[in-house]
Amino acid sequence: MPADLAVIGLGHLGLPLAQAATAAGVSTIGYAPDPQTTPLTATDGPLTATELRRLTAAGFRTTADPAALGRVRTAVICVPTPLGADRALDRTAVADAARTLAAHLRPHTTVILESAAYPGTTEDFLRPLLEEGSGLTAGRDFHLACSPT
């Protein structure tokens, strides 16, 4: 089933976004490549049982199927960018999410990076990964934006 919004990463940034979008009536999926690692499946997760029931009753669902990303109008990448041993941001999760999304990206999709990543990450790091993996061009075939945290 198509959705208007895909939230990639359901941690402290993605989960509140998914909740707000779903509450506003936006058809939303949460993409988690390993459903066992999503906070929604943890018994000590961030949502109460009532909040989780409300979220799923409103239509929110999670998926581990990357093909679902090709059926959305907007994809927001909300994966962690922790500090590495060298004190630089580790963008591995951003790269993984970008490659997964790029394989299913279709024209006219809006992609937003919601991250604490350094300025320029969207243009200099994310854009080339999306363009190379999709064969599409940002600004012409798909839209690309950043929402700094």
Image (tube, helix red, strand yellow):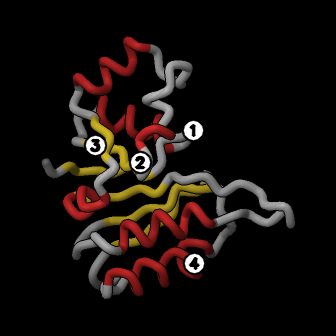
Local crowd at mark 2 within 10 Å, few (<14), some, or many (≥20)?
Answer: some
- Does label 2 or label 1 sit earlier along the sequence? 1
Label pair 2/4, CB-CB below 8 angstroms: no
Residue of label 4: 125
Residue 28's disc is 3
Residue 81 in the image, given as x and y percentages of width and height? 65, 57
Q: Quadrant of residue 27?
A: top left
**Residue type at numbered disc 1:** His
**Residue type at numbered disc 3:** Thr
69 w.r.t. 62: above or below: below
Residue 60 in the image, given as x and y percentages of width and height? 27, 34
Alpha carbons under labels 3 and 2: distance apart: 13 Å
Alpha carbons under labels 3 and 1: distance apart: 17 Å
Local crowd at mark 3 within 10 Å, few (<14), some, or many (≥20)?
Answer: many
135 w.r.t. 109: above or below: below
Q: Residue at x 54, y 72 (%)?
A: 122
- Does label 1 or label 4 sit earlier along the sequence? 1
Q: Residue at x 57, y 38 (%)?
A: 12
Foreground mark, 3 or 2, reads 2
**Residue type at numbered disc 2:** Ala
Q: Nearer the viewer, residue 34 or 89?
A: 34
Residue of label 1: 12
Label pair 3/2, CB-CB below 8 angstroms: no
